[in-house]
Amino acid sequence: MYMFNDMPPYLLIMIGLFVGIIVMIIFNYIKNILSAKNVENLIEKAKKEADQIKKDYISEAKEEASRYKADIENEIKDKKAEVKETEERLLQRENNMDKREELIHKREITLDERESNIVDKQKELQDEKASIEEIKKEQVELLEKIAGYSKKEARDLVLKKVEEMMNLEIASYIKDRETEAKLEADKKAKNLLVESMQKYASDVANEQTVTVVELPNDEMKGRIIGREGRNIRSIEAVTGVDLIIDDTPEAIVLSSFDPYRREMARVTLETLIKDGRIHPSRIEEVYDKVSKDMKAKILEYGNNALFELGITKVEPELVELLGKLHFRTSYGQNVLQHSIEVANLTGLMASEIGENVALAKRAGLFHDIGKAIDHEVEGSHVDLGVNLATKYHENDVVINTIASHHGDTAPTSVIASLVAIADAVSASRPGARNDSLENYVQRLQELEAIGNNIEGVEKTYAMQAGRELRVIVKPEEIDDLGSVKVARDIKTQIEDTMQYPGTIKVIVIRETRSIEEAK
């Protein structure tokens, strides 16, 4: 210890370095020895593992080769078995073909024998048939000799007798069936009509030519007449209706053959009575307003009829024409009510026989639609109705019904025939129509037509039950002297073209008005 302390430091360092180097050399040597041993161990171990793997692969390869060999041998065995089976099957099929060929050969021999036998039998049958025909001929000749008729004569005689008997039976059968069918048809038709009339029973309301307007008091009569009768003359001139003011208390009678004109006069007069202002200008003002309101009322009548019958999809123009039928009469019978009644009867009969009920009602309702304009347009109501229905694209059945309901055209459908029946039933009901009233109305219409056909005439009204014709002329076209000529021309035409009882007074009115409005 003391020896190291005496030594110089650099010497100590050198000694330390020498000792360290020696230690490191020794350590590396030992390490190399250990590493060599490890490498040898690893190489030995690797050799052993490689030998083991080689042995395993060789063993597996042998096993795989053995397995493949076994599979190939099995497959070859199976193929040999299959080939052997195929050979046996082909051999069996060949044997079967030989047997079949032998069987066919035997069958051909048998068929040849049969054919030979059939030919022999046919010859025998032909000989027997010839023998039978000979015997039959001899028997027929013998029968002809005994009966005194040839075969053809006997055949014709029998056929003639049978034909006569059959004709008699057929005629008798047809007659019985016809009689039975007629009786049954009559019975069913009567039942159908009776049931339809029972199911639809409406009241008969005969249209009159007068309307009564109630007044609040008798003093109102004087106000309606006006000073020197100017109010009543103005009302009659504007409306074309006769006002009959008699001793009947609190009532005025409106008389006109035209229900539409009479209704407008009634509404106008009632409006004036409620308003209290009655003078010529107010009368014209109220009448103009009523004229406009009547169109809405006409549409209401038409729509109510369609609603009552359940008919839809009707052109507005047809609805308006339908409403106008409310103010049209035929022999005193309201045409709109008559059309509704015909529609209901037709619908009931159509339902009984399985026809289209909706189409039947539609045809019944529109069958007289031409009467809405026959007093405005020249032509029969049938032709006008057909034109209207065609114009508004109605069903062909409806068009044919309108054309055929009076027998002018042949009906092409069952519904057309039903409408004609319903029309006759509705018109022939007790009290439904009045022939004398229709003639009276027609005469008044002819009177007005004569006046309206004169050039320069504005309006023409038949008054006093046809005993008076009032003609209002256009003052700018006809002067006072011309008014005299118009009256004479109308008088001459009435005398030449009409037949009428008593006399007819023709009054031509020419009125000039000057109107100014102070502002």
Image (cartoon, rainbow, N blue to C red):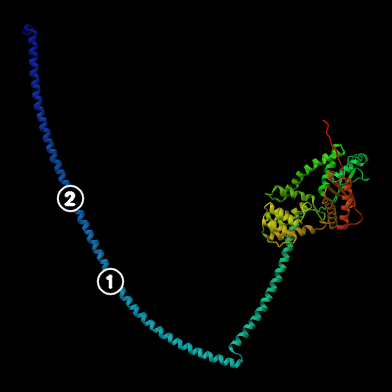
Quarter of the picture containing the C terminus is top right
For residue 263, side relative to residue 151 (left or right): right
Front residue of this view, candidates 178 and 503: 503
Q: CA distance from mark 1 to mark 2?
A: 45 Å
Residue 251 rendering spot, x and y as whole percentages: 89, 44
Kind of element beneath mark 1: helix
Amino acid type of disc 1?
Asn
Q: Residue furthest left?
A: 3
Query: How many neighbours does mark 1 have within 10 angstroms: few (below 14), some (14-19), or many (20 or more)?
Result: few
Residue where numbered disc 2 is placed: 65
Report the front residue among 201 and 416: 416
Q: Which residue is mark 1?
A: 95
Whether 85 is drawn above or below 112: the answer is: above
Measured from the top left, where is residue 16 in percent x and y?
9, 13
Amino acid type at circle 2 is Ala
Q: Position of residue 228 (x, y in %)?
A: 93, 40
Callout 2: helix, strand or loop?
A: helix
Please tell me whether residue 374 is drawn above or below residue 16 in the rendered image: below
Q: Horizontal and vertical percent for residue 3?
A: 5, 8
Left or right of 277, for residue 172: left
